[in-house]
Amino acid sequence: MRMLPDDGSKDSMGRYGEGVRPPRPPGRPEGAVAAVTKLLVPLLVPLIFMLVVVPTGFILEGPGPSFDLQEDLSVEGAQTYPSQGELLLTSVSLQESRLIYNLLALFDDSIELMKVQDYLGEELNTEEQETVDIVITFLSEDTAVVVGLQEVGVPVEVTELGVFVVGVVPDYPAYGLIDPGEVIVGVNGEAMESMDRFAELVGSTPEGDTVTLQVKELDAELVDEVNEAVEEGTMQRPDLAELLEDGVREVSVQPVYEPELGRAVIGISPQEYFTYSSSVEVGWDLATVKGPSAGLMMTLSLVNALTSDDLTGGEKIAGTGEISLDGDVGPIGGLPFKIQAAEREGAVAFIYPVENQEDLAGFSTGLDLYAVDNLDEALQVLQSQE
């Protein structure tokens, strides 16, 4: 065996002896690295803090969690059937953006930022909006139950209570006169039994004339109490009639003609406000889900549970969309992110509202996408997966 010298000299292969440090290359004074480190650390710490902690006034939007609505569904009073597949509700994740994401967004098209002011609105009343969001969620679930039960032939009695004001459009007649979260229970003294009748009465108002609206307010404190009870599991479904205060106020509004609609409007975003009764009790344990976009998939999961044939075909089917009492599927927000969430969960198909088609311009996915106008078309999609 060839031994290396232990005197700091090299052998014929150019190797140093054991235990001896090779000479330091010239031009690298000892302690230079440590000095630079001591200089940079005080500068880097506040910089890192700014990047990951300091808010920027923007919201970061991305794919959110997904839920198999069949697992969270409870039905009493009717026979239910198991499913081999899944019906996924997908969601959007919203969080306050930090400076680092604002910088990354300059180079990464997948990062979507929006101004907090643009998302929430310049004159947003946060307590008022919270009440609206809670009630919209109640209405969405109730609508899904009514439409789903009717689809499978279960008798349901629906009592229309009025038109729920989801939002009021600035620079339109109702702005400043009616608040989001109020319920229009009458027009010119006629009780409102449908949104179609409301649109008819307002839309046919002669130019320059006014309509007198009868309006009720929600008991915001009671709404919060009921929502807390629902989230804690001590209440399954509230009676929305009980959330209205007793008093009625009258508001005179002069509608304006809207050329795109071909009728007069007052500038509100309406939704049916109703209550129902049925021998079948239905509910979903979804305390973290807010808003109307779960409506379509809730309806499909209920229909599937009450149908002997498994409509999923053993596959993972995802989707989104608002459902109305007549079975129409309405538009939602964040569609591309919801599709990405479905991809992440291994879904094979995604159902979405036709009115959201433009949101997918330039978007690509490996999922089979199905745009639908109503519940019947969505059910046809499921049946095609069998």
Image (cartoon, rainbow, N blue to C red):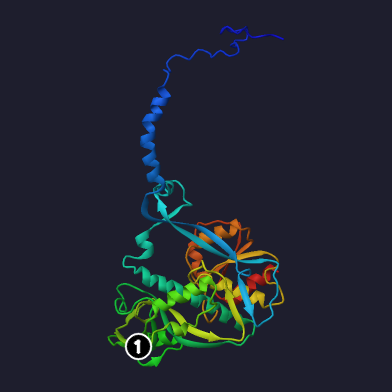
Q: Is residue 56 visible?
A: yes
Tell me the amino acid under the disc marked 1: Val
Rendering coords of residue 195 (x, y %): 44, 84
Which of 21 and 342 lies nearest the eye of the viewer?
21
Q: Is residue 385 left or right of residue 326?
A: right
Which residue is painted at 71% across and 75% down in the image? 309
In the rendered image of this protein, does residue 49 appear above or below residue 243? above
Which residue is painted at 69% across and 70% down in the image? 83
Q: Quadrant of the rendered structure where residue 209 is?
A: bottom left
Residue located farthest toward the bottom when viewing the structure as drawn: 189
Structural crowding at the residue carrying mark 1, measured as other residues with C-alpha within 10 Å and reported as few (<14), some (14–19) or many (≥20): some
Secondary structure of the residue carrying numbered label 1: loop
Q: Is residue 206 visible?
A: no
Q: Quadrant of the N terminus?
A: top right
Q: Quadrant of the C terminus?
A: bottom right
Rendering coords of residue 18 (x, y %): 60, 13
Which of 4 and 335 lies nearest the eye of the viewer?
4
Residue located farthest toward the left when viewing the structure as drawn: 208
Q: Is residue 370 left or right of residue 117?
A: right
* Tally of numbered discs: 1
Circle 1 residue:
248
Rendering coords of residue 381 (x, y %): 63, 70
Rendering coords of residue 314 (x, y %): 70, 66
Which of 133 and 316 lies nearest the eye of the viewer?
133
Q: Is residue 272 left or right of residue 117?
A: right
Which residue is painted at 43% across and 82% down in the image? 243
In the rendered image of this protein, does residue 12 appear above or below residue 134? above
Q: Quadrant of the rendered structure where residue 113 is?
A: bottom left
